[in-house]
Amino acid sequence: MNNLILASASPRRLELLAQIGITPSAILPADIDETPVKHELPEHYAKRMALEKALAISAVHSDKTVLAADTVVFCGRRILPKAEDEPTARRCLMLLSGRRHRVITAVAVVRTQEVQLKHAITMVRLKRLDAHEINEYIVSGEWRGKAGGYAIQGKASAFIPFISGSYSNVVGLPLCEVTQMLKTRGE
């Protein structure tokens, strides 16, 4: 697609788009502040982030279609961080161990001041993890930069006995919703 910009640095999003035959003409991650507002609910946060990313890139490339997304792992109303260090990854895995949680990905498509915003929510349950399993996963390094401290498409798939909803949403981009949004735009 020669007029689609993916506003994301995520290689997983690029891989997911390739699965449905979409190759963006450019990949331009948005440099925005991703700090949640105090007491912000996960759904609002994900939508706000996706929209802000899309609008930031669209402001510079107004003649292109911009696709941006934000994936949030949350437990109750608590937004889990992207795990950037081992203690954060360990805390996330311990919190999610033996529990259900939800993953929301909000997607924004912007073209010439026209905005589309959709989201998908998936329920995921991690089995109860013992200390050895958590340690082995930490050693793998796969958790780095991952919301909630795990990647469903990797080694952590062995921890997940239950999922209800879109698998691609948990990876980082709900493909059904993206396809509908781009078709609506005639892309």
Image (cartoon, grey):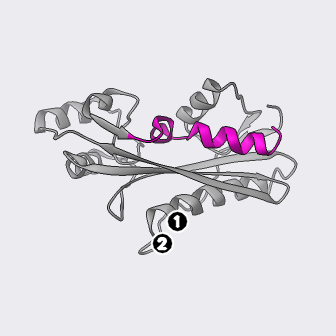
Magenta highlight: main SS: helix
Q: Amino acid type of disc 1?
A: His
Q: Amino acid type of disc 2?
A: Val
Residue bearing the label numbered 1: 44
Left or right of residue 146, residue 31 in this image: right
* Screen quadrant of the N terminus: top right
Crowd rating for badge 1 (residues with CA inside 10 Å; few <14, some 14–19, many 20+)? few
Helix, strand or loop at label 1? It is helix
Q: Nearer the viewer, residue 118 or 62?
A: 118
* Screen quadrant of the C terminus: top right
At 69% from the left and 42% from the top, the residue drawn is 180
Asked if residue 38 lies in the magenta stretch, the reply is: no
Residue 166: numbered disc: none
Quarter-of-image position of residue 159: top left
Crowd rating for badge 2 (residues with CA inside 10 Å; few <14, some 14–19, many 20+)? few
Quarter-of-image position of residue 17: top right
Extreme-bottom residue of the structure: 38
Helix, strand or loop at label 2? It is loop
- Cα separation between marks 1 and 2: 10 Å
Left or right of residue 26, residue 71 in this image: left
CB contact under 8 Å: marks 1 and 2:
no
- From what the image shows, is residue 24 above or below residue 54? above
Left or right of residue 77, residue 16 in this image: right
Q: How many marks?
A: 2
Residue bearing the label numbered 2: 37
User: In x, y percent, where is residue 15?
Assistant: 58, 28
At 55% from the left and 38% from the top, the residue drawn is 10
User: In x, y percent, where is residue 151?
Assistant: 38, 36
- The magenta stretch spans which residues? 164-187
At 83% from the left and 45% from the top, the residue drawn is 64
Question: Which of pointers 1 and 2 lies earlier in the amino acid sequence?
Answer: 2
**Foreground disc of the pair 1, 2:** 1
